[in-house]
Amino acid sequence: MRRLLLSAALGGLLTAFLAVPAVAAEVLVSQNKPATASSSESAGTPATAAVDGDNGTRWSSAFAAAQWFQIDLGASTAVSRVAITWEAAYAKAFTLQLSDNGTTWTNAYSTTTATGGQQSIPLSGAARYVRINLTQRALEAYGYSFWEFQVYAGSTTTPGGGLLSYAKPARASSEQNDPQCNPCTADRAFDNDPASRWATSPTTGWVDPGWIQVDLGATAQISQVVLQWDPAYARAYQIQVSADGNTWSAIYSTTTGDGLKDVINATGTGRYVRMYGTARSSAYGYSLWEFSVYGTGGSPTAPPAKPADPVFPATRLVFSDEFNGAAGSKPDTAKWTYDPGVPQNGEVQYYTPNSENAAMNGDGQLVVEARRQDYQGRQYTSHRMNTSNKFHVQYGRIEARIKVPKGNGLWPAFWMMGEDFLQGRPWPYNGEIDIMEVLGRNTSEAYSTLHAPAYSGAGGYGQKYATVDLSQDFHTWAAEWDSKGIRFFLDNALVFTANKDTVENTRGPWIYDHKFYLILNLAVGGDFPGPIDTTTPFPSRMLVDYVRVYQ
């Protein structure tokens, strides 16, 4: 689970040593301020326990749905963020509210799909009072409870973006660099690539202690450290800082680490930052996908800029194929790359570039046809095509209107692959986004799924959803994708949401903030749909009315 934790500042808030002016560092403003609540479960769980900086004490409410908790900051404050560390009795639905007088409230954030754990919620507004209005419990037999409720003011943003550790020199107690993890060196934890990682050596590094450190290039004021753990995480570790890389001081310590994503609000000063692990979670060593240090000062290198998030509904058409060619004409090679060959996943067809497997029907549709046909040593043929090296996209609404075939063993799909696959990065490290998969044995349900190193194949992160018989008519599948996540739609109805923060805290790294290319195919047989049989009709056709991408 994600851990969002605060360590008291060592030395207090320090002035940045940047050569250019920096925005003031984010500051915790709620600790030990007056806190009140609608109720408390007992004298041992008062409201004040959630603002005492002690992760071993908590507030808990009476066992009722309508509850609230609020803090008086003492004066009007430019609030930038609220961090909540929930106990098991978390809120599914709540609203964060701001007020100048404690009477009139303005809603600043609202959710009905919270999942507990540790939350870091950006806010913007000036207020003396901050309240959480709780409306739906996760555990209906109990109330609400959190260990810490923290309010921050200011910003961690600097002209370099606040991230101090990107592409900085790194060292570790040991590194893995072999066919199983090549390379899993220390620098991979600081490359801003969530699909690469550092791991300790399997021959010398599956021991305690184990450590990894980064040189920020100059003295820095640390405000936050974010760790994205591989399953080989630390049960006990410290975050340490040093001026010289030799003498270290701890600014955060835990003996109850639980892996996945740790967001640590720990303040201190130093040129070097180290994760020092003292107890492993398993017989293996230590491994981190990402180790990110935020604050001011240092000598930051800005990571590559990401495109702006689209505003949905997105209306600027950046790619389309309406398939309006003459009957029998093949897909437009200015837009599509034919992808012939032997498939994966136990499928039995051969993908051909031939027009009998992919051609226009003259009615404004592409026909992808699976046939019983001897070809290149196989008894079935079909077609697969993609936009590789012709159209790649990061963020937007990607949609297609498709009519799928029915029949045991048929497997139509509309999906995307990370473009780095084309440069040799193996699956699933490149990332895969399955917008639509339908299994011909049951065309009244469909799948939308994400695949990454930490969750792939049968363990992918996704959703199966029931619907009408999809083989009877055309239906529109779409994905609305930005830096916060991906929302999947069928005929404009939301069927699945993959929230970046949720994935990082429950499954592993989010690896979809880069360019992808589009794929259409119709598979025959395989591990997922199962085998064809005597009832499977051939030829079978997937009809595609259009493919469009909006930003």
Image (cartoon, rainbow, N blue to C red):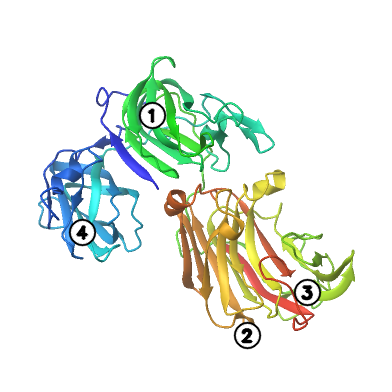
- Residue 475 lies, in percent from the top left, at 58, 77
Q: Are marks 1 and 4 in contact (CB under 8 Å)?
A: no
The residue under label 2 is 472
Q: CA distance from mark 3 to mark 1?
A: 57 Å
Callout 4 secondary element: strand
- Name the kind of residue labelled 1 in the image: Ile
Q: Which residue is mark 3?
A: 370
Q: Which amino acid, by three-letter code, is at mark 4?
A: Asn
Residue 469 appears left or right of 255: right
Q: Is residue 7 left or right of residue 425?
A: left
CB under 8 Å between discs 2 and 4 = no
Mark nearer the N terminus (1 vs 4): 4
Q: Which residue is mark 1?
A: 239
**Sequence order check: which comes first, mark 3 or mark 4?**
4
Label 3 and label 4: CA atoms lie apart by: 56 Å
Labels 3 & 1 near each other (Cβ < 8 A): no
On screen, residue 113 above or below 418: below
Q: Amino acid at mark 3?
A: Ala
- First in residue order: circle 1 vs circle 2: 1
Mark 3 packing: few (<14 Cα in 10 Å), some, or many (20+)? many
Q: CA distance from mark 2 to mark 4?
A: 47 Å
Mark 3 or mark 2, which is nearer the start of the sequence?
A: 3
Instruction: Say if 512 sits above or below 203 in the image.
Output: below
Percent position (x, y) of residue 129?
15, 49
Labels 3 and 1: the sequence-earlier one: 1
Residue under the point 38% across and 33% down: 158
Looking at this view, is 261 or 190 the one in front? 261
